[in-house]
Image: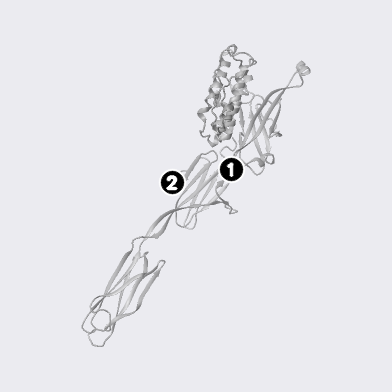
Amino acid sequence: MKRIVCGLLLALTLGQPFAQVPFAGVAPIVAGVVAKDVIEDINDVLTARIGQATTSGDYLLEKSARELKLLMSNADTILKGNIDRTFDKLTSQQQIFLRTATELTNGLNSLAESALSIEQFAAMDLNTVLGNLPGISGDTFLLKRINGYSQVYKNKGVYRIKFTGQAFKSDRRVLVSINGKPVQLLPFSTDYVATAEVPVDLINEYFSEKEVRRIPVRVQSWEKRKFLKKLVLGAEKQVLSYDSEMLLLPRMPVSYELLEVTAGTGWSQAVSTASNTALASATGKSGRWNSYLVGVEIPAGALMLTDRTKTWVAAGVPAGPWGDWTGGVQYTDYGPNGPRRAARSFAHQIHDQNRTLAIEVAYRTPVVVAGSKRVRLKDPISGVEAESRLLFDTLYEGTFSPEYSKYYLRLKYFNGEEITVDTQTANPSGIEVRPNITSTLMSVTVKIKNPYEGA
């Protein structure tokens, strides 16, 4: 008899989003309940929680529920033929197993919306769960670990998925199917480990650019019967049939933003002035004309505003019939920012009076202008740009401008994990960021390693 009080059906009837369904969990265990019913109840809750997690993208909840499913696939091994007995007839160790499995299943609520680290996608492993089960050794389990729980896209070769447990002795027949199709097993190099090779053309079409996809995995194992049992019951006995799913990680698993902080040269908002005067002395003789020059210079590196230059007679007889400016202002001493010097000539014709000539120029001074701009990473060989997402195990290069000051690289993995690397920080594990700053080239290379290659 089912003992679960599950809000799933009611919640769906009321139209609640699947990710928000309130799960009541497994009912408390009482003395007269049959062990098989408890196991079925736990598996039903775990199946529902996996469905919830895959819909909401909660990878930690999904993996934890799948690991408990893996644990429950070994229930027969732990109960040792007592699966049809009531709870009070089980050994104390078997009671601990069912109680702990129930508590762990009901405790999955605490994991909702927590982050699964990128490294934890590598495998499903019962070692952590077994830490909560004193006296129970995983060495007796038919299946206790799956390497290759998720896969990173590759263009060629094979994907490998490795199964560890008692079901994989060299004298047993093992069948692994991916998406309903049998795949080749490598020859057993040691007992208890079976390695399947999945050709890329079998599953590559199911990978998505940005989303995690899942495909079914089934592993089965048969042992050979001996003597009379072989004649009566057949040549083989199936000891394991386990169904799960393989996660296909996004082809482009990391989004990025590379920002270059610039320290370019701009011009001050404030306008400064420079002025100078020159004395036009009396000619000493009526009818004589003398030419005088008044000039001024701005600081090196400044920008002269030539449209604001002024000249005038600061003292003495104003310009007129007895003396006047000859021609316009002359600009000289040109540099990268334009002229540094301005001057103007004055023709003076007063034999007994002096004039004071004046000139003023306006200029702006250079200032450091901080800014930022996005830099696109690209394949250093082909030059193809990575618009917003990156592959694992692929080298990218970004080129900075002459105004480069420093950089910030922001990475966001498909599981929500975010990492920032900048000029001052050391590279996090698995991320290689190498700036190359010289007088002729300013660039950076980026490579994100597959976080569990070879796990």
Identity, as a three-letter code, of the amino acid under mark 2? Gln
Quarter residue 79 falls in? top right
Tell which tag, 1 or 2, sits nearer the viewer.
Answer: 1
Can you identify the residue that label 1 sits on?
210
Look at 25% across and 78% down and name the residue there: 318
Residue closest to the far top: 89
Asked whether 425 or 302 is in front, the reply is: 302
Identity, as a three-letter code, of the amino acid under mark 1? Lys
Q: Secondary structure at mark 1?
A: loop
Residue 318 in the figure: left or right of residue 392: left
Quarter residue 38 falls in? top right
Asked whether 375 or 324 is in front, the reply is: 324
Residue 330 position, x and y percent, is 36, 75
Quarter residue 362 falls in? bottom left
Q: Residues within 10 Å of mark 2 (few under 14, many from 20)?
A: few
Q: Give the mark nearer the N terminus: 1 vs 2.
A: 1
Q: Secondary structure at mark 2?
A: loop
Residue closest to the far front: 14
Asked whether 34 or 241 is in front, the reply is: 34
Q: In the rendered image of this protein, does residue 26 appear above or below residue 285? A: above
Count of numbered labels shown in the rendering: 2
Q: Residues within 10 Å of mark 1 (few under 14, many from 20)?
A: some
Which part of the image, by quadrant, shows the N terminus? top right
Which part of the image, by quadrant, shows the C terminus? top right
Residue 378 position, x and y percent, is 56, 51
Can you identify the residue that label 2 sits on?
424
Residue closest to the far right: 231
Res 449 visible: yes
Q: In the rendered image of this protein, does residue 409 appear above or below residue 191? A: below
- How far separated are the C-alphas under marks 1 and 2? 30 Å
Look at 78% across and 18% down and name the residue there: 231
